[in-house]
Amino acid sequence: MIRLKALLIKEFIQMRRDRLTFVMMIGFPIIQLLVFGFAINTDVKHLPTIVFDQSLSQDSRDFIASLTASQYFDITDASTSYQDVTDHIQSGKTKVGIIIPPDLSANLKHGQSAAIQVIVDASDSMAASSAISAAQMVGQLKSQEIILNRLQGYTGKTFALPVDVRIRPWYNPDFVSAFYMVPGILGIILTMTMVMITSMAIVRERERGTLEQLIVTPLKTHELILGKIIPYVFVGYAQATVALLVGILVFDLPIRGSLGLLYGLTSLFIIASLALGVLISTLSKTQMQAMQMSFFIFLPSILLSGFMFPREAMPLFFNWLGNLLPLTFYLQILRGIILKGVGLSVLWTQILALVVFIAIVLTISIKKFQKKLA
Amino acid sequence: MYAVEITNLTRRFGEFTAVNAISLKIKTGSIYGFLGPNGSGKSTTIRMLCGLLAPTSGDATILGLDIAKDSEAIKHKIGYMSQKFSLYDDLTVIENLKFYAGLYSLSQPEGKRRIAQMLALAGLENRQNELAANLSGGWKQRLALGCSILHNPPILFLDEPTGGVDPKSRRMFWDIIYTLSQAGTTIMVTTHFMDEAEHCDEIGFIYNGGLIASGPPSALKSSINGLLLEIPTPEPMELLAAITSRQLPYLDIYPFGANLHVLIAEEHASRYTPFAANLISPSLEDVFVHLVKSHRKEVLA
Amino acid sequence: MITLENVTKTFGKQSAVNGVSLEIASGEIFGLVGPDGAGKTTTIRMLCGLLSPTSGNLSVLGAANPEAIKHHLGYVPQRFSLYGDLTVMENIRFIGSLYGQTTDKINALAANVLNFTNLLPFKDRYADNLSGGMKQKLALAAGLMHKPTLFFLDEPTTGVDPVSRREFWQMLYQLNKEGTSIFVSTPYMDEAELCTRVAFMNEGRIISSGSPQELRRSYKYQVFELSTPDRNLKARLKSSGLRDINAFGEKYHLVTDSSPTAITTVKAALAAANISITDLNEISPNLEDVFVALASEVN
């Protein structure tokens, strides 16, 4: 115990002396949250759009007005030729081109189908899918309106739609991207800083030569590893608190579940990330190697954990791969508690997964760490 | 005629002053020994002279060229070799030399001629196809020297060239330094082996960033006042303890190899007759022990 | 107390230590002497349990497993291995508590070792801001916090100023008097004279060992010390039948195979070249003479 305490005191003194790193550890989550919370918006609106209206009729103006009203399209240019539309999209000035045929009004009048062409720059798939579904939606609504109007004109009766699908989006009824993103970013920030800090911790002592002195003392491997983990649990909590405060104050994030439970379970995730960092640190010989291995963890954490893409849509193998990452479970815990307000009865599988992860990774670290120089 | 002139050269790193207002001159064609313990500012000074570091203040000229303004011109006129000189371990002796000949853009025939000279100088003629990795410390050092003087520089800076080399190889290295000096090269060399300093024409001793003494070895030695006695003994430490406990008068006392050196005032000579002491002239190591101690006293006072 | 039997350590293809056997009794100041790259550091690291030998056996304080005896070992590595961003006192306390000492004990010991190493006035200085000599003293002080019975020091005085070097050796001597066995490596031949027993190491092998007197006695040649203003002595005496000529400071050591004629030849050659001899005496060899002779015999 005395030895572990000595290590902890040493780590805290060093942390206090290294002000810049400490400020970065706290400032980093604030900046990341603000940047990503505002910037990442999966619901892409206000796409710059060019319109080539050959019809120049009441109907075409109606249709363009409906497009603008949807907020998905910002008409930035009106064009006079087909070539012009192509040029705009190619140069990237606009993402969408809408071409209304000259015979729009005539066709509508004669009950014939009118073809409106929507050209989408699909090189940006997120924007493209937004534009496509919005355009389809506007087209369908317009068609329904016209058909209902026609029926009324023929029969003199009013009609309702035969099937009316009513969707009720629970937990985030207004589809606020930030509600979904902020807990995710919190998880990502914790992963990045915790893994990075500890992955450097032991290998830095190795590079500086101080490990040589430590190894010849009676210090035990598990003491060394715990001494490198415990101080950073505090740093992790500081980060999590800062991130949650920013979420609540800036993004109006609702905390529907128990804040106490959230804090408690956060410790599991912090320890899991630190343990992963320690494992990297024991496996690498230089700080450079540790850095590269850390990045090897980050990318899957972002892509496979469900942070960006729904895990349900992934091929089975990658879904399974995501289950090896602590972030996957922590995200479920975070979103569960913050957005759904669920408790232990729902989250126990995730808790179990994190505990097992910590136990396995720490055991490997202690086994793998050699009290030798080479 | 001075090849190197330094006036008040100073270099700070943040609050730390690595080199503190050093002034010295090196005569063309001489060997200047730059001595001092690790971290005293030797390497920093040499790096400034070679244009690798900018001075914080002060001036220095090399062959009349200003180190601040003409550092690129200076690079063609100097050779620089440090203990960490980078040889390519996976190239052979001759390949290393050829590579450096290319870096100095020597012409084909000139390169060939110089490489042959360097091989002869370093005694590596019979090992030119061996990988540098397979050379032992002393041979590597000589190859590194050969690589750094391929372009025949009039001034050579050697930073701890004999660190990590066995005593025999150290002597061979110094033989090469003499040969170069006799051919007219001006040489500035740092070392912390005091006995090597005896070979230099002039010596500067740097301690905590400041030059605390300089001059030819003989002048430095005559600066010691008092008689220096050498008492041969198989156990210098035992004898030291014995003398200090007997409260014999001395100015300084310290072990020196298998001897004890005692510096005394002339009138106390008779007190040491029972020890079969020899009166000796001080070596440079004696001088530096003396200099460092008086410098420390000054700092404390 | 320390036994090495045919110990070898290879790194890849390179063998750093090659079949070393040594027996070291307790109470000694044992000096492992040789140039850089001789294998000194590797040997010490194996003895401290930092490296495992590739082959051969070693035991330290009667234990083959170094983990068991770490409480009794002190070690000062060649490279400064304490924390530059901690103060002298913080470093001392940290190392002290790694050996499981209580706070009271640490305070008492810290005052003691800082006093012994003359570091007390610098106790609040960051280790990074100490001079080379003081860093080594700090490393020594830290190593003393648990009163080891066996102390390993790897080139503690390399690059340290001549006064600090001597102060350091006086401390080692003092510790040894108080009962600590000391195993020290050094590239300085004059420091070898201060050891009770010495092993010369070159290119991974022990080329000779014994007390400084024994090593000198084993020397097979005669050494003459020549003082002369001439600097081109080597070339001049090339064909005079000398075994070796080595510069020692401003003097030269002429090594002969105990033949009386060699010195006569030297005198004649120098007289013919009109070079004055300030002094020419037979002297007893110093350890550097011994090492140079042994190293060239092995090659």
Image (tube, rainbow, N blue to C red):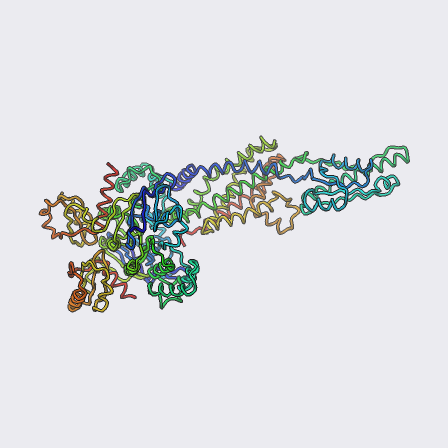
Against C203, residue A156 (above or below) is: above
Q: Position of residue B35 (x, y in %)?
A: 28, 49
Query: Number of callouts in the render?
Result: 0
Residue A173 falls in which quadrant of the image?
top right
Asked if one can make out residue C22 in the rendered structure from this viewpoint, the answer is: no
Q: Quadrant of the C terminus of chain C?
A: bottom left
Residue furthest out toward the right: A155
Q: Position of residue B71 (x, y in %)?
A: 40, 49
Q: Image check: C41 left or right of C257? A: right
Q: Quadrant of the N terminus of chain C?
A: bottom left
Q: Position of residue A360 (x, y in %)?
A: 51, 48
| Front in this rendered view, residue B36 or C156 | B36
Against C104, residue C232 (above or below) is: below
Q: Position of residue C33 (x, y in %)?
A: 28, 56
Against B299, residue C34 (above or below) is: below
| Front in this rendered view, residue B100 or C47 | B100
Against B293, residue B124 (above or below) is: below
| Front in this rendered view, residue A294 or A367 | A294
Asked if one can make out residue B190 in the rendered structure from this viewpoint, the answer is: yes
| Front in this rendered view, residue B14 or A319 | B14
